[in-house]
Image (cartoon, rainbow, N blue to C red):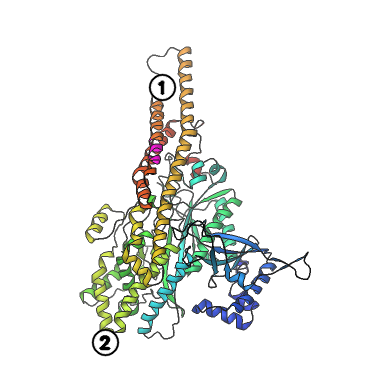
Amino acid sequence: MSRVPELFGSMVFNDSVMKERLPAEVYAAVKRTMQAGRHLHADIAGDVANAMKEWAIEKGATHYSHWFQPMTGVTAEKHDSFITPSKQHPDRVIMEFSGKELIKGEPDASSFPSGGLRATFEARGYTAWDPTSYAFIKDDTLYIPTAFCSYSGEALDKKTPLLRSMEAINRQAMRILKLFGNDDVTMVNTTVGPEQEYFLIDADVYAKRRDLLITGRTLFGAKPPKGQELEDHYFGAIKPRVMAFMQDLDEELWKLGVLAKTEHNEAAPAQHELAPIFTKSNIATDHNQLTMEMMKKVAARHGLVCLLHEKPFAGVSGSGKHNNWSLSTDTGVNLFEPGTSPHENAQFLLFLCAVIKATDDYQDLLRVSAAGAGNDHRLGAAEAPPAIVSMFLGEELTDILTSIENGTVYGGKEQTLMKVGVHALPRFPRDSTDRNRTSPFAFTGNKFEFRMLGSTASIANPNIILNTIVAESLSLFADELEQATDFNTALHDLIVRTIKAHKRIIFNGNGYDDVWIKEAEQRGLHNLRTTPDCLPHFADEANIKLFEKHRVFTRQEVHSRCEIMLENYRNVIRIEALTMLDMARKDILPAASAYVRALCDTVISKKAVIAVSGKCAEEDMVAHLSSLTDSLYSAIGKLDAVIQGEKALHSAIALAEYYRDRVVPAMQTLRKVADELEVHTAKSFWPYPTYDDILFSVS
């Protein structure tokens, strides 16, 4: 552990490296760009590029890459070496890296999802350096975080709208803070700490499961005798092989400046979690992408495979990614910190009301930000929040808002000391709110925890939405308060009016309870259960106007993203369905038939040797298995026919709905029969490792 401070950030071109290697005026210009969003002059970029190259070469780098986040859900990179032919000696090379190469790259944009923004023949795209996110070295390559746009300027990535949304909420939050007299504040940043859940399984077992190889989740698999019923895995002792992986992962992430902090076993067998310390939203997004990549890479070193799919195994909890979001000033003040007397903290209450209003007004957008074929398996399944968006505030804050609404005096509550009945144990103050794991959006002390997001998703999606919708609330608040003749009276009236208008979104109860579904409907809240239910709302006119107002998305960018997400939903399920057909036809059906044949041979041999009165056990088994194989064959045919039926459809939404309504049920029918066959087939005949083999294979 004594090495950790020296190790941390050792492969990052961070502030301390820049301060050491850049001329003072160049360093000051870069800091102004990072802190205030000032434009960086090309001459300055040249000095930065040269220092960056020299540092990278000293660290062993031979190439550089503009690293970006297209609409594929993963990162993209193109590598160029530093070599340039020497003018004095044409048969030799020198190592060069210019400011132009740092600032701009030109990857081919035609092969990335564009949702109709670009025709196939329109290939040119640009990557633009994001100087607010540090460059880093990985695999002997200097990685430069960048945004990605088309030749005509439309955003083709997740980073560009995220940066736009960060500027939007900064503009509106600054208007509010100036009204409260915070003249020392020059910038408001959104900060994020994403908790990442994942599964670790043995690589040899993984290699024998074609569904895991192709889709990232098991498409077949009977429930094992033991799952998570005993609740003994959660926070349990970490197995040596997993601990070695975690230690290795920590080191790799620390080198890259990722603030990896907390690690533990999660609820399901073979499931784990890693959580970082909060950092600025765009940097947190970059770091989370690096974390997911490093998890897979480090797992391979240990003979393991890291599964990031939201639902790799039926019957046990899937994986999510809790997005802990907050607002902080450049003077170090957390704007969601209630203080010791939140009922008297008007600034806190106004920012809280902005989030309440935003969550209620734009429930559909928050739901869209967590949409995806994989996440549809989790939401509402008693292992993740329901698809209904609501807010948890806890008893104290809810009581404060109620007293403000009713015009009554809030007496406050004395801080309670925890007493657990053992004198030797220390007493400590109890938190003002409990935690509600069933809530999609919970206030947890000085931040909001958005719990709907799936484990594979980029955290850019929910943070773009959160930043934009809260910016809109703050904008409307500022418009009103800036015109007020009596600020305090106007502020009080605004808070009261907001609470009354939007209190329906606050729910502190059990989100898993069926009663809540009915109550939410009575409150008028959306219940957008599946991805095709919610995605079309992304392009609702009110939402397009919101994005255009805050310059986060253009109308064209909204429609393109809607198209991309719908196509992705259909493509993911289609790949899964085709994989199921292939496995059932080529492996499961032949294996079951072979077992039936072996049982028939046993029956014949048994009757030839001994006199059997009535049916023997094997005959009953043959009859049952024959019926199941017939059902399997029928289910294969029906799924195949349903997939072929998509040819009559053309629009993205029609195809998505067709796959939800027709293909997914046919897949479920096929799986049900195959899993029943697995239960009754001898293990020596079954073609794949079972859930027992997979979930309990890592020691």
Q: Residue at x 47, y 65 (%)?
A: 155
Label 2: state its secondary structure. Answer: loop
Amino acid type at image mark 2: Asp
Quarter residue 496 falls in: bottom left
Labels 2 and 1: the sequence-earlier one: 2
- Relative placement, left or right, of 586 versus 85 is left
Quarter residue 412 falls in: bottom left
Quadrant of the drawing holding the N terminus? bottom right
- Relative placement, left or right, of 256 versus 311 is right
Q: Residue at x 69, y 64 (%)?
A: 60
Query: Is 580 drawn above or below residue 334 in the view shown?
Result: above
Query: Is 483 drawn above or below residue 213 in the view shown?
Result: below
Amino acid type at image mark 1: Ala
Would you call the spot at circle 1 few (<14 residues within 10 Å), some (14-19), or many (20 or more)?
few
Residue range in magenta is: 638-644
Rendered location of residue 140, percent (x, y): 65, 61
Would you call the spot at circle 2 few (<14 residues within 10 Å), some (14-19), or many (20 or more)?
few
Which residue is nearer to you in this view: 502 or 393? 502
Rendered location of residue 50, percent (x, y): 66, 73
Which residue is nearer to you in this view: 204 or 183? 183
Alpha-carbon span between mark 2 and mark 1: 88 Å
Task: Read off the residue under disc 1.
Answer: 617
Which residue is nearer to you in this view: 436 or 131? 131
Tell me the number on the disc at residue 603: none
Query: Is 221 drawn above or below residue 543 in the view shown?
Result: above
Which residue is nearer to you in this view: 519 or 235? 519
Tell me the number on the disc at residue 486: 2
